[in-house]
Amino acid sequence: MTNWLLTIDLSDQWDAEIPFEAKRDAIVARLRSPRWRKLTAYPDTLTEAIDAVEASWDIPSFDAAFAEIHDLADSDRVWIET
């Protein structure tokens, strides 16, 4: 069983009623958690991945960028609640 070091709760951002840009911006703000940045072994990679999510212009580009966030979260033992 994995011992998660940090949880980032994004569960309220998956509401279909929220416009894409507002949802993306709220998610990016939470992903920039200073606690995650302190514990990651790859701070530059984390910053680049979050920047890619921030630069996403539609759902497919968001999904592609968010996949890397999930990989980094797993390696850093960060649970992303969706």
Image (cartoon, grey):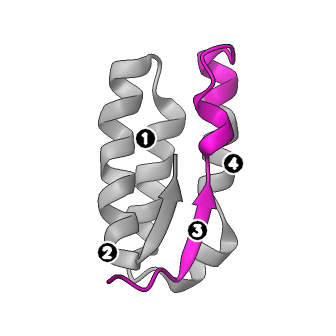
Q: Give the label on residue 75, or none.
A: 2
**Where in the figure is residue 55, as x and y percent of width and height?**
49, 31
How far apart, in angstroms, are the residues tagged by discs 2 and 4? 21 Å
Dot placed on the residue nearer the N-terminal end, 2 or 4: 4
How far apart, in angstroms, are the residues tagged by discs 1 and 4? 13 Å
How far apart, in angstroms, are the residues tagged by discs 1 and 2? 18 Å
Dot placed on the residue nearer the N-terminal end, 3 or 2: 3
Reading the image, the residue beneath label 3 is 7
Q: Is 25 located above or below residue 1 in the figure?
A: above
- Asked if labels 4 and 1 touch by Cβ distance under 8 angstroms, the answer is no
Q: Secondary structure at mark 2?
A: helix
The amino acid sitting under disc 1 is Ala
Dot placed on the residue nearer the N-terminal end, 1 or 3: 3
Please indicate whether residue 19 sits to the left or right of residue 54 in the image: right
Q: Nearer the viewer, mark 1 or mark 3?
A: 3
Q: Nearer the viewer, mark 1 or mark 2?
A: 2
Q: Secondary structure at mark 3?
A: strand
Q: Nearer the viewer, mark 2 or mark 4?
A: 2
How far apart, in angstroms, are the residues tagged by discs 4 and 3? 14 Å
Reading the image, the residue beneath label 1 is 52
Q: Nearer the viewer, mark 1 or mark 4?
A: 4
Which residue appears at 58% of the width and 68% of the height? 7
Magenta region: 1-23
Crowd rating for badge 3 (residues with CA inside 10 Å; few <14, some 14–19, many 20+): some
The amino acid sitting under disc 3 is Thr
Crowd rating for badge 4 (residues with CA inside 10 Å; few <14, some 14–19, many 20+): few
Dot placed on the residue nearer the N-terminal end, 1 or 4: 4
